[in-house]
């Protein structure tokens, strides 16, 4: 019997991926999230879609963790605003003096807030300055969210993070997000974004991903997704691209001895943008 899974639940699987190689991901708290069911699903995913997926998720975490920490240490940012934060653990991996705003769908963020509070109380996690906010990116969320962020952010220089979100939403929602980011941020603040490019569709691993996902959707439902080309980021009016990496370039930096089969890699692209 195939196990169905919701997007909310994929956040557990992502945490499980990061926990498989802590030396690479540097996420020493990811192991707190997965259940036995999550681990079974993760194994099925790896066996059916891509044997490189755990490695790729660890790389993504490592790249952005270091990028954000370097900007903080250079005193260029003071606040991380994580849109669609899932069960990532960046607040506990970054310096304790950094402030955080975590944003996700109501059921996800409320669950995360509750678990984080429990683990901080039991000393499984260190205390951090985190504000948890609810948002449904397909609703009229901007006015209320903008007001809440502004009251927390004040004059802090921020890094807005969009990880694992763009694949699941459409271009209109993406446009709304980047318009909101520009409203939130001032000159010389940063955005980090993760997305696939259209060429991924020709790869065996991606075809397997679509098949694997659609088999677990409601009958006859089709999986909708978004790819984003470089030109989208390069043509943003309010942002300039300051770094662009992908799974292969980051692998060359952090694990150069690892042999990857390109056709079997779900090659994500990582972007760091700076507000003009």
Image (cartoon, helix red, strand yellow):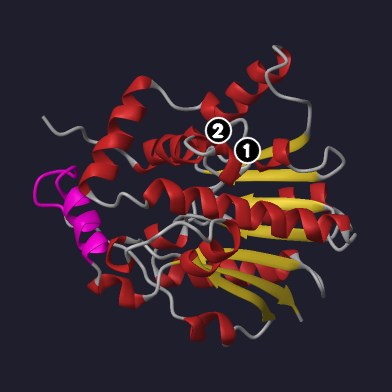
Check the picture and name the quadrant holding the N terminus.
top left
> In the rendered image, is residue 181 in sight?
yes
View extreme (front): residue: 257
- Toward the viewer: 262 or 274? 262
- Toward the viewer: 21 or 35? 21
Q: How many labels does the image show?
A: 2
Element under label 1? loop
Check the picture and name the quadrant holding the C terminus.
bottom right
Q: Earlier in the sequence, mark 2 or mark 1?
A: 2
Q: In this view, does 273 lie to the left or right of 229?
A: right
To which quarter of the image does residue 233 belong?
Answer: bottom right
| Mark seen at residue 102 | none
Q: Is residue 237 left or right of residue 196?
A: right
Q: Residue beneath label 1, please?
A: 89
Q: Counting other residues with Cα less than 10 Å from the Cα at mark 1, is it few (<14), some (14-19), or many (20 or more)? A: some
Q: Position of residue 36 (x, y in %)?
A: 35, 21
- Please report the residue visible at 40 percent of the width from the left and 37 percent of the height from the top: 13
- Please report the residue visible at 27 percent of the width from the left and 67 percent of the height from the top: 263
108 lies above or below 24: above
Q: Position of residue 180 (x, y in %)?
A: 64, 66
* Label 2 close to label 1 by CB (< 8 Å): yes
Q: What stretch is highlighted in magenta?
A: 204-221
- Please report the residue visible at 73 percent of the width from the left and 64 percent of the height from the top: 184
Q: Residue beneath label 2, please?
A: 30
Element under label 2? helix
163 lies above or below 202: above
Examine the structure image and report whether residue 69 is included in the region drawn in magenta. Answer: no
Q: Counting other residues with Cα less than 10 Å from the Cα at mark 2, is it few (<14), some (14-19), or many (20 or more)? A: many
- Toward the viewer: 142 or 220? 220
């Amino acid at each position: 019997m195939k196990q169905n899974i919701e997007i909310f639940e994929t956040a557990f699987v992502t945490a499980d991926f990061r926990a498989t190689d802590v030396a690479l991901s540097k996420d020493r708290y990811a192991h707190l999230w997965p259940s036995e069911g999550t681990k079974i699903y993760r194994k099925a995913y790896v066996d059916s879609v891509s044997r490189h997926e755990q490695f790729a998720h660890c790389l993504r975490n490592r790249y952005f963790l270091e990028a954000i920490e370097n900007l903080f240490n250079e005193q260029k940012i003071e606040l991380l605003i994580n849109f669609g934060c899932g069960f990532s653990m960046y607040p506990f991996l970054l310096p304790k003096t950094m402030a955080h705003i975590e944003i996700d769908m109501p059921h996800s963020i409320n669950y995360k807030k509750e678990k984080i509070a429990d683990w901080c109380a039991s000393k499984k996690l260190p205390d951090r300055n985190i504000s948890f906010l609810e948002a449904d990116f397909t609703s009229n969320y901007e006015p209320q969210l903008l007001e809440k962020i502004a009251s927390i952010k004040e004059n802090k220089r921020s890094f807005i993070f969009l990880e694992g979100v763009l694949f699941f939403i459409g271009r209109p929602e993406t446009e709304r997000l980047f318009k909101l980011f520009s409203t939130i941020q001032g000159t010389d603040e940063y955005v980090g974004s993760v997305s696939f490019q259209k060429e991924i569709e020709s790869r065996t691993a991606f075809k397997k991903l679509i098949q694997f996902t659609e088999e677990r959707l409601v009958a006859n439902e089709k999986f909708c997704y978004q790819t984003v080309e470089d030109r989208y980021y390069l043509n943003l009016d309010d942002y300039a691209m300051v770094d662009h990496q992908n799974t292969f370039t980051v692998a060359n930096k952090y694990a150069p001895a690892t042999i990857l089969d390109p056709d079997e890699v779900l090659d994500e692209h990582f972007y760091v943008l700076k507000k003009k």
